[in-house]
Amino acid sequence: MLCDVELGLLLPQLATVQVDGGQASVELIRIVASTRVGTSVACPSCGLASDWEHSRYVRHADEAVGGRAAVIDLSVRRLYCQNPHCPKQTFVEQIDGLTVRYQRRTPALQRVLEAVAVHLAGKAGARLLLVLHQVVSWSALLSCLMALAVPWTAHTPGGWRR
């Protein structure tokens, strides 16, 4: 029996993009999507909105859905900044919940990796992530752990310590 499920319900971060297609196999779900043409995006440097398209390229975002690895092939726009005094001439639009500058992982998957790194780190964490269909090396998990901010804790009179 075939069931029509709204993709936006399964992956709400896809609600702001246009889903162009998808394929599902036993091991992998691949979703092809693109950002919407004509929407304005604020420049990350000066904040001026722009919809003047320079070019497009495909970003790959890793995710997990229903116990399977999922890859989202997302076509994003590189836009011109229309402010002549802005130090950025072009910038790439970011999609909330789906892309982060210089990251391949979605924010949701990054939070999972950080939680595993905090509790297991190293080889044990990498083995657990294999069960979750995410291939990450033990050293990448340690790097993820080292990149996390350490919360400040109160110390006895004499100040704060880390």
Image (tube, grey):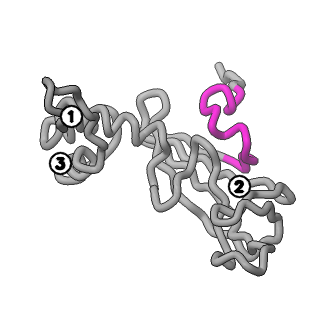
User: Which of the numbered marks, if any, corresponds to residue 34?
Assistant: 2
Task: Identify the residue at image location x=79%, y=54%.
Answer: 36
Residue 119 included in the magenta stretch of the image: no
User: Which of the numbered marks, if any, corresponds to residue 160?
Assistant: 1
Residue 1 in the image, given as x and y percentages of width and height = 64, 19
Magenta segment: 6-21
Q: Residue furthest front?
A: 158
Task: Identify the residue at image location x=30%, y=43%.
Answer: 149
Circle 3: residue type:
Trp
Residue 66 in the image, given as x and y percentages of width and height = 47, 27
Q: Secondary structure at mark 2?
A: strand
Relative to 70, 90 lies left or right: right
Comes first in the chain, label 2 or label 1: 2
The crowd level at tag 1 (other Cα within 10 Å; few <14, some 14-19, many 20+) is: few
Residue 48 in the image, given as x and y percentages of width and height = 77, 63
Q: Is residue 42 above or below residue 155?
A: below
Q: Secondary structure at mark 3?
A: helix
Nearer to me, 8 or 151: 151
Q: Which residue is mark 3?
A: 138
Q: Is residue 74 above or below residue 153?
A: below
Residue 74 in the image, given as x and y percentages of width and height = 62, 55
The CA span between labels 3 and 1 is 32 Å
The CA span between labels 2 and 1 is 48 Å
Circle 1: residue type:
Trp
Q: Determine the image quadrant of residue 133.
A: top left
The crowd level at tag 3 (other Cα within 10 Å; few <14, some 14-19, many 20+) is: some
Q: Secondary structure at mark 1?
A: strand
Comes first in the chain, label 2 or label 3: 2
